[in-house]
Amino acid sequence: MSDANAAPALPASHPRLIDREKEGVASAASVISGFNGWLTVKITNVVGTMWCAYAFAALALISLPAAIAGGTAPLIAWIAQTFLQLVLLSIIMVGQNVASAASDKQAYQTYKDAEALLQITDELHKLVAINNRLTTEIHTLVAKKL
């Protein structure tokens, strides 16, 4: 087998894959920098937990007896302004964190699937090139024998 019929060299990697390796994975810390960014991430991570929701619920329940004693209007105001806003804030953040984690996992799986397809495609191109080279050599040998 001669080197003249060797398969053409394929690029080692797609330019986007090279850029992706340099960029790495985006994170909150990489987007927001400095003290304000650090503090924002820390507070968000604390407030967005179920433990914080439990603490806010306990805090809100402390004022419930006074709201009940005040009648209908103060009770409705307590529900709307204290309980819902204070407790549901943390619960919504927890829900967003869970949804975000699921989305991140799905995106990572899609990325890994695409990476696998690229590798399979690369191998397929190599096999096609080998097949073409061998076919050419077979045709050359058959033509010499005739």
Image (cartoon, rainbow, N blue to C red):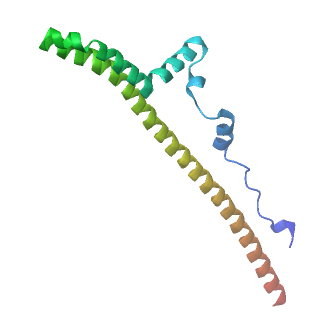
The quadrant holding residue 136 is bottom right
144 to 4, vertically: above or below: below
Between 139 and 125, the one lying in front of the other is 125
**Residue with the most extreme left position:** 72
Q: Position of residue 53 (x, y in %)?
A: 39, 24
Q: Position of residue 77 (x, y in %)?
A: 20, 13
Quarter the C terminus occupies? bottom right
**Residue with the most extreme right position:** 2
Quarter the N terminus occupies? bottom right
Q: Position of residue 84 (x, y in %)?
A: 28, 21
Q: Is residue 79 left or right of residue 15?
A: left
Point 49% across, 17% down: residue: 43
100 to 39, vertically: above or below: below
Q: Position of residue 113 (x, y in %)?
A: 57, 53
Between 55 and 77, the one lying in front of the other is 55
Between 10 and 83, the one lying in front of the other is 83
The quadrant holding residue 69 is top left
